[in-house]
């Protein structure tokens, strides 16, 4: 069935696959990349983005960067953390979240669960 036919319909059943259990690194992955993901420190993000990144880490959805990414403000390849759009030099002085770019209270909670 094409998506055009059922565009106006609403879903009547719940989502089939729900993440009910946290991702177990010891059970599913043991490569060196997994050890890097477990030790990721979330910095320069607002509370909402910190929660999103913690969820990605706990459920095994976090993918680290393979090379530095480009900052949307200064256009330099200085972003070393995945899912960030602003580099540290652009986000800290202006009080912006490095992930969403909004002016919000930056969480200094550096714990990744």
Image (cartoon, rainbow, N blue to C red):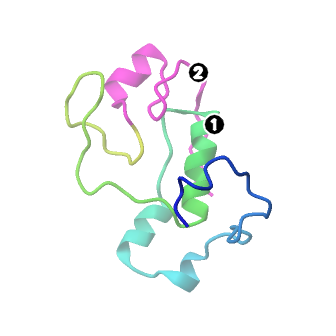
Label 2, residues with CA under 10 Å away: few <14, some 14-19, many ≥20: some
Outermost residue on the top side: it is 94
> Which of marks 1 and 2 precedes in the sequence?
1
Residue 55 quadrant: bottom right
- Using the image as rendered, state which of residue 50 and residue 13 is in the foreground: 13
Instruction: Give the structural element (helix, strand or loop) at label 2.
Output: loop
Task: State which region is magenta.
Answer: 85-113
Image quarter where the N terminus lies is: bottom right
The answer to if 24 sits in the magenta stretch is no
Q: What numbered label is drawn on residue 58? A: none
The answer to if 99 sits in the magenta stretch is yes
Label 1, residues with CA under 10 Å away: few <14, some 14-19, many ≥20: some
- Using the image as rendered, state which of residue 2 and residue 15 is in the foreground: 2
- Residue linked to disc 1: 48
- In the displayed structure, does residue 87 sit left or right of residue 17? left
- In the displayed structure, does residue 64 sit left or right of residue 108? left
Q: Position of residue 99 (x, y in %)?
A: 46, 35
Label 2 and label 1: CA atoms lie apart by 10 Å
Q: Position of residue 39 (x, y in %)?
A: 48, 60
Image quarter where the C terminus lies is: bottom right
Outermost residue on the front side: it is 5
Q: Is residue 16 above or below residue 45?
A: below
Q: Is residue 107 above or below residue 15?
A: above
Instruction: Give the structural element (helix, strand or loop) at label 1.
Output: helix
What residue is rendered at 47% in x and 55% in y?
40
- CB of mark 2 within 8 Å of CB of mark 1? yes
- Using the image as rendered, state which of residue 26 and residue 103 is in the foreground: 103
Q: What numbered label is drawn on residue 104? A: 2
What residue is rendered at 74% in x and 70% in y?
20
């Amino acid at each position: 069935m094409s998506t055009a036919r059922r565009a106006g319909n609403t879903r009547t059943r719940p989502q089939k696959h729900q993440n009910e259990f946290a991702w177990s690194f010891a059970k599913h992955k043991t490569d060196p990349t997994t050890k890097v993901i477990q030790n990721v420190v979330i910095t320069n993000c607002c509370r909402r983005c910190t929660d999103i990144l913690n969820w990605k880490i706990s459920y095994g959805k976090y993918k680290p960067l393979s090379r530095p990414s480009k900052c949307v403000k200064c256009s330099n390849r200085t972003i070393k953390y995945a899912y960030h759009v602003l580099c540290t030099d652009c986000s800290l002085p202006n009080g912006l979240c490095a992930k969403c770019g909004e002016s919000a209270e930056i969480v200094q909670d550096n714990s990744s669960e």
